[in-house]
Image (tube, grey):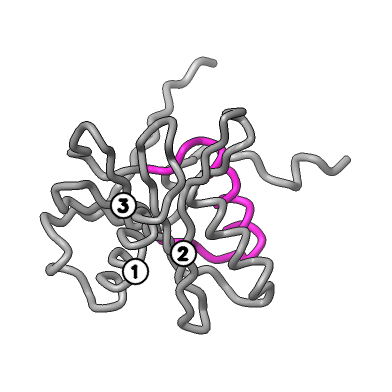
Amino acid sequence: MKQNIEIKIVFEEYDNISELQNTDQELLKKAVEASGNAYAPYSEYYVGAAVLLGNGKIITGNNQENAAYPSGLCAERVAIYYASSQYPEEEILAIAITAKAKNFSIDTPVAPCGACRQVLAEYETRQNKSIRLLLMSDNGKIQIIKSVEDVLPLMFHANELKK
């Protein structure tokens, strides 16, 4: 029997950073700071990410491009992999993501690409606890999403590999 199933996402939206709690403000500011150090000579699209760990540490990352395009890496993965390699036992509580471009304004909050969503989903599954996403645009609009699963609702899980 055919069924139509609808998937909805609920998130908080804010007009500017001053409306957020201090911890979230700091995390977003670190992401903005990290975007300023991105290596993006080809796209001129500078992404910054900041990961908040359970011990209170904030780890940042930014996109790293390469002339051989597939060899580059997104800001989210730079930050999350570094956090996991240096603090393997710490939970990842949240990730803030923002971007700026050289030749245009980014008017909507920046969301992670599909590959980054899957990587974040792996860590969320691994720690069995949601990772909050804080997404911010150039104009200061912010979206806060409670879980990676909300932005990747039909995500691939490791248990699907087991026979």
Element on which disc 2 rests: strand
Marks 1 and 2, how far apart in space? 9 Å
Question: Within the magenta stretch, is there residue 50?
Answer: no
User: Disc 2 residue type?
Assistant: Thr
Q: Which residue is mark 2?
A: 60
Can you say which quadrant of the picture contains the N terminus? top right
User: Disc 1 residue type?
Assistant: Leu
Marks 1 and 3, how far apart in space? 11 Å
Q: Toward the viewer: 19 or 46? A: 46
Q: Is residue 90 above or below residue 79?
A: below
Q: Which mark is residue 48?
A: none
72 relative to 104 in the view: left or right: right
85 relative to 108 in the view: left or right: right
Q: Which residue is mark 1?
A: 27
Q: In the image, residue 60 lies at what x, y percent? A: 46, 64
Give the residues drawn in magenta, as a range: 111-132
Element on which disc 1 rests: helix
